[in-house]
Image: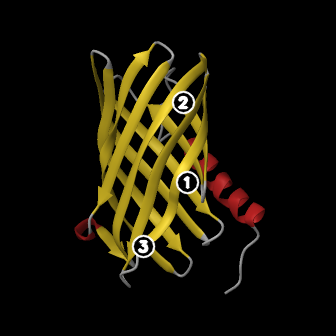
Amino acid sequence: MKKRPIAKTLAKYLAALTSLALCPSLFSTGALAKDVSLRVGEEAVWVAIDQQLNETHASQLGLVFNSDDDINIVSGGLFATGQREQFSGRLGAKVYYADLDGDNGYGISLGGDLVFAVLPQLDIISGLYFGPSSISFSDVDRYEEWFIKARYQMFESGALTGGYGTLALKPDDGKDVKVDDGFFVEMSLRF
């Protein structure tokens, strides 16, 4: 099996993600903010662009890159958002395509994120997404993602986050593939 250079592969996916983010049909052109996040975990690098479409809906484009196992996942999601007292969150679905070093598949994962505002600058965030075999196709049988993290708002347009999480896929051959599992740090910028 031939390994692709990490920088070249990452650059290709970042270019594709940037092109999608600039597509006006995916994001509104209004004055609502976009968040760009870079997350570095023990096994993978994550890039996400989150857009609040209006007061009650949001979208996300994402890329997960694991160079050790030659795994790439591209996803896009739509969510309903809301807030109650100190809690806010989103519920919805992510559509994903996974390249698992020879096994390729796609599907839908359902779930959401819950944010608890501990202090004005400090949030605790948890998330859970699950895509069972009934909505996973091709060589992928299941998608599982969960995380818990603490986010500190350093500036109005910048935040630092640390946490723990897992992203695992189950190909048709039955063995679980851990795309990322462990502690991570994340930086988010708002534009």
Q: Earlier in the sequence, mark 2 or mark 3?
A: 2
Q: Position of residue 166 (x, y in %)?
A: 45, 55
Closer to the camera in the image, 31 or 99: 99
Quarter of the view holding residue 11: bottom right
Distance of label 2 from label 1 (alpha carbons): 16 Å
- Residue receiving disc 3: 105
Quick check: can you spot residue 167? yes
> Which residue appears at 52% of the width and 74% of the height?
100
Residues at circles 2 and 3 in contact by the CB criterion of under 8 Å: no
Quick check: can you spot residue 22? no
Q: Earlier in the sequence, mark 2 or mark 1?
A: 2
Quarter of the view holding residue 132: bottom left
- The tag on residue 34 is 2
Residues at circles 1 and 3 in contact by the CB criterion of under 8 Å: no
Q: Circle 1 sits in a helix, a strand or a loop, which is it?
A: strand
Q: Position of residue 89 (x, y in %)?
A: 33, 31
Distance of label 2 from label 3 (alpha carbons): 29 Å
Closer to the camera in the image, 181 or 54: 181
- The tag on residue 77 is none
Q: Circle 2 sits in a helix, a strand or a loop, which is it?
A: strand
- Residue receiving disc 1: 63
> Which residue appears at 41% of the width and 68% of the height?
169
Q: Position of 189 compared to 7: left or right?
A: left
Residues at circles 2 and 1 in contact by the CB criterion of under 8 Å: no
Q: Is residue 175 above or below residue 40?
A: below
Distance of label 1 from label 3 (alpha carbons): 15 Å
Q: Position of 125 compared to 136: left or right?
A: right
